[in-house]
Image: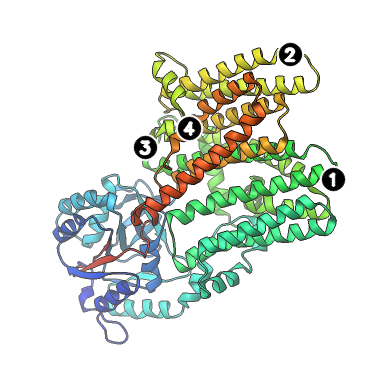
Amino acid sequence: MLTAAAPAAQLRTGDGVPLRERLTTQLRAAGAREVVVTTELDEVARLAQSGETLLLCTEDLVAHTAVLRHLVTSPVGPTIALVLTDGVVGAAALQEERGQVTAVGAGLSGEPTGVFGGALRVGPEDLPTLANAARAVEAPGDASALDRLLTRFVQADTTIFAHRIRLLVAHRVTDQPGVVAAEAAVAAVDSDAAELKLSVKEKDDFFTTYFVSTWSPYVTRLAARIGLGPSGVTAFSVLFAIAAAVLFAVGDRPALVLGGVLLYLGFVLDCVDGQVARYTRRFSVFGGWLDTMADRAKEYLVYAGLAIGVERAGLGNGWALAIAAMVLQTVRHMTDTWYGALHDEAPRRPRAAGTAGGLGERLSRASTRVQADTGSLSYWLKRTVVFPIGERWALIALTVALFNPLVSLVAVLAWGVLAFAYTFALRTLRARAMRVPVMSTVDTPMHRDDGFLARLIGRAAVRRPGPLPLALVAVLAAAGLLAAALAQASGVELPWLAVLAVGAVLLLLAGGLGSGAPHAGALDWLVPAALRAAEYLFVIAVAVAAGVPGPFTFALLFVLTLHHYDLTARLEKRAAPRPLLASALGWDGRVLLLSAAAVAGVTGIAVAALAAYLFLMSAVGSIAGWATATPGARRAPGSTDSAHALAITADGAVEGRNG
């Protein structure tokens, strides 16, 4: 490695052990199957052809072993760079945006946000680019080979996530006094205690921060000691939520109070499962998917328990409130997912011309300032007004214990509507300024949940409006049908079947025409949420018109929401699509089926049968998918269940492979 002072190969630890030798031992402790020493970037290019994840590391790095283990096991993405705040001569300065390295070295467009920490994990999908970058690195200069390689790697438009350390210690050194100082800093921090604190999210919501995370690490450590993994904790969390739902359904005061307590404890376990995963570094794609699906399922089962409690107490139509709350939360979550995907894609896109200084740009800057002011009143207001899961469960637990299930459902709906209005308004303004066509980066028909008919209509269209206006027409058609169904249920005479035919045809045509259109507009990320809303409103309208019992309608919508959460969860976890996905019929197929059932006068039977069928197909598809997935597909990137081979270069670079 080229440095401004003594070569790293001559540096020694306080025990007299060569720094390179100590780092080799740490790499093995971090999960390395093999450690290789090389001085040539051509060797990096050769190792990249193996197809195994590589960890490259400079030999001037002094750090806790946990720093390397966390980099190796991080689930955020396939390729990750260690980023530090302090640097040494030759260390590459860099810029980050939303957790991604966007520029390095000479490519900086402003002030750097950090420096390269001398460790880089490269996933299999980025190895060909790494090999090309290694061959193209220019002749040695002031920077080490790995710093120069990172610069070339970023220039190749590789998505590289930034891994910043917190509580633990890592420094790059150039001389023996630097080694002594760095070792002292490492020794001053208890690695296990720091890792336990790190298992708690750095920035969480108000209720979670002050009423859960203050004591949940003790439960996390206990779970780790008895060998209870993240999925096991998730299972206990689901059981607590189901027990709370049953008690809410019973409805007397002791049951409601005990249910509120169990709901709170269930939420604590919901936080602990992620903390156990981070503390033990046991990440998996399946575990992340299971956690997402379990969170939504248990929340909506709690809504069902509250609905039964309302009905049993004679307080009103509990099922209508529960259905409204479930639909609202699901549509909100769909917009959350796609807005998050848009934000993750934005750093990889050049800023659209003419957006600087606009309202959306100003809102983005204001949001960034508030987020940076951690702990301030504005910070907590911003995090709380969006009604996150902790606040939802706290609100339910308190209102049901102090009042009754009706108050809980009304409170959830009222706060949910406020939160949706706030986030929808601000995010659409910011998205218009960003102009990122995120839907064009995915399998659009799959994430729209289009079936055969919608795709056929989309292919047949020659000229059409954009997909978002068409999706909004579908929403209006479904909303009109619901208004007509409610009017009929209240005694207004209507030609329901004719109204249904017109509404269903309009919904199918509008939604289907958008299937074949490019989803490249600034707001087209809203299309999936709009189609979800259209389908849910249609289901409710048909059920209301036919007098289908509330539990049956809730059951069908519950299964539909889980089907749609499966799509977004797999998007977020980078998992393969669920097998038998086509058996779900698509939103258009389900609309057509329910329309035919309404004409035939068997809507209730169709609703129950469709709910059972979709649940069965989803369960079979999920089980088949995870059972037949390759071990690599089931694991998160960098999972320590895989073998690793790492190579330390004599000029200060370390390479790692994940097989």
Q: Determine the CA span between mark 4 and mark 1.
A: 39 Å
Tag 4 and tag 1, C-beta contact below 8 Å: no
Q: Earlier in the sequence, mark 3 or mark 2?
A: 3
Q: Which residue is mark 1?
A: 313
- Give residue 215's position: percent from left, percent from top: 63, 69
Residue 350: assigned label: 3
Is the residue 237 above or below the residue 367 in the image?
below
Residue 494: assigned label: 2
Q: Earlier in the sequence, mark 4 or mark 1?
A: 1
Residue 438 figure quarter:
top left
Tag 4 and tag 3, C-beta contact below 8 Å: no
Q: Can residue 656 be seen here?
A: yes
Q: Secondary structure at mark 2?
A: loop
Q: Amino acid at mark 4?
A: Asp
- The 10 Å Cα crowd at callout 4, few under 14, some 14 to 19, many 20 or more, is many
Q: Nearer the viewer, mark 4 or mark 2?
A: 2
Q: Determine the CA span between mark 1 and mark 3.
A: 58 Å
Q: Is residue 76 left or right of residue 52?
A: right
Is the residue 89 above or below the residue 377 in the image?
below
Q: Secondary structure at mark 3?
A: loop
Q: Determine the CA span between mark 3 and mark 2.
A: 54 Å
Is the residue 442 above or below the residue 457 in the image?
below
Q: Nearer the viewer, mark 4 or mark 3?
A: 4
